[in-house]
Image (cartoon, rainbow, N blue to C red):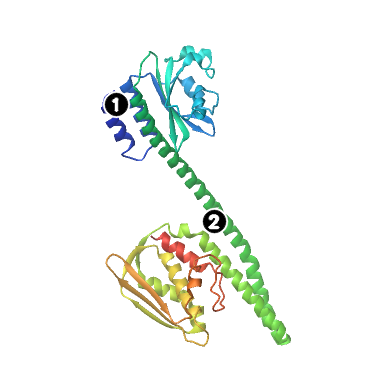
Amino acid sequence: MVLHTKKDIVIKLVDLLFCETVSLQKIKESLQVVLDELKADAIWITQWDAFAGRLAASLGLDKEIEDLESNLHKNCQCKEFIYQSQKKHEIYYLEKCTYITQFLKNKVNFSYHYSIPLRTNGELIGILNIAFSKRKRVSENLLAFLSKVYSAIFSNYIFCKRLEEQGKELARKNNDLEVLVSAISHDLKTPIISSKGFLKIIREKYSDKLNKGILWYLQCIEKSIERTEELVKDLLNLSRIEKILSSREEVLLKDVIKASIRNLGYLVKNRRPKLLLRCEDIKVYTNWHALFHIFTNLIANAIKYTPDERKPVVEVACNCCDNYVLVKIKDNGIGITDRELQNIFTPFNKVKTLDREGSGVGLSIVKRLVEGLG
């Protein structure tokens, strides 16, 4: 494309707009380049969304015009671009504009402006306006060039801005969810603790007076309460993952694994597994609490999902490779089918091969923690 203007304008625009993350400040700096090169009196970009426009960036506009353009408006001349999608640009004269009052027309320092539509995928996203006080012809090639450059840059800017807004909204919703889950979990703990206390009293005071049928029902109630308690705990852990991952430190793998095994004292005491720890003094830069949750869950599953008639054997091995550490947890449990394997990280999904207590949330927590650690 041959441009009937100085090549400096192309170089400056490329340097400003294509070398860094696009910001409104960079767009304004680029507008200054166009203003200076074309010796224009004013330049501004109007963002169009849902058939209405609003000022995005400007240079040289009177304060009153800036204030007027900053509000959402539909009735200015530029709206014609919405219905005339093939037009590459248009020249509008201030005296013909019905949107601006006569008082403001007398105050502003330009008499007409080029309006250049900015589009992405055929959709109008904005209008680049270049205003002059004296009649000046701008080459068609330059206008086409500016249209393409600012269409690409402005669409990128809008996308990044929306992404940022969505990120803030998502963070707010996650925070609200964490507060809600914490509140629900806290409120559920009280009746759970009360129920466990009353069941304990019944067992201690009346177990010798109750028949086996009633005692069996009491045992079922106890198990249901334990399941509810575990679910509440897992939901709370699930909601706190972001906080768990917020800090990093140097961690000795062997110490975390030993802490996880100690935390499973109740399970180790009941099942009496053979635990084999093959881990040298390997240090990794990670989050201690996240790693603790991961090992606790995986080792607990390895012990739990071994048939009752079989002594559980669990081996945890850590090996240094080129630039990572490989951790393996091996057991002599029931294994898992290919069909079940596809859903093991889905929340509330439980392996049906062997009936075991659990919320079905544990492995989804492990997956999110592992991904969060990178």
Residue of label 2: 178
Q: Nearer the viewer, mark 1 or mark 2?
A: 1
Q: Relative to 128, does residue 180 appear above or below in the rendering?
A: below
Residue of label 1: 3
Residue in the image at 39% along x and 70% along y = 256
Q: Residue 89 location, x and y as percent?
A: 42, 25
Quarter of the rendering occupied by the C terminus: bottom left
Element on which disc 1 rests: loop
Q: Nearer the viewer, residue 181 or 194?
A: 181
Rounded to the nearest whole Å, what is the CA distance between mark 1 and mark 2? 57 Å
Element on which disc 2 rests: helix
Question: Could you say which quadrant of the image residue 5 lies in?
Answer: top left
Q: Relative to 298, does residue 270 appear above or below in the rendering?
A: below
Q: Nearer the viewer, residue 15 or 222?
A: 15
Question: Could you say which quadrant of the image residue 37 lies in?
Answer: top left
Q: Residue 51 location, x and y as percent?
A: 54, 31
Labelled disc at residue 37: none
Question: Could you say which quadrant of the image residue 45 lies in?
Answer: top left
Q: Nearer the viewer, residue 237 or 89?
A: 89
Residue in the image at 47% along x and 34% along y = 125
Could you tell whether 322 is left or right of 179 in the image?
A: left
Could you tell whether 39 is left or right of 219 in the image?
A: left
* Amino acid type for the residue under numbered disc 1: Leu
Residue in the image at 36% along x and 71% along y = 327
Q: Residue 312 location, x and y as percent?
A: 46, 83
* Amino acid type for the residue under numbered disc 2: Glu
Label whose residue precedes the other's in the sequence (1 or 2): 1
Q: Residues within 10 Å of mark 1 (few under 14, many from 20)?
A: some
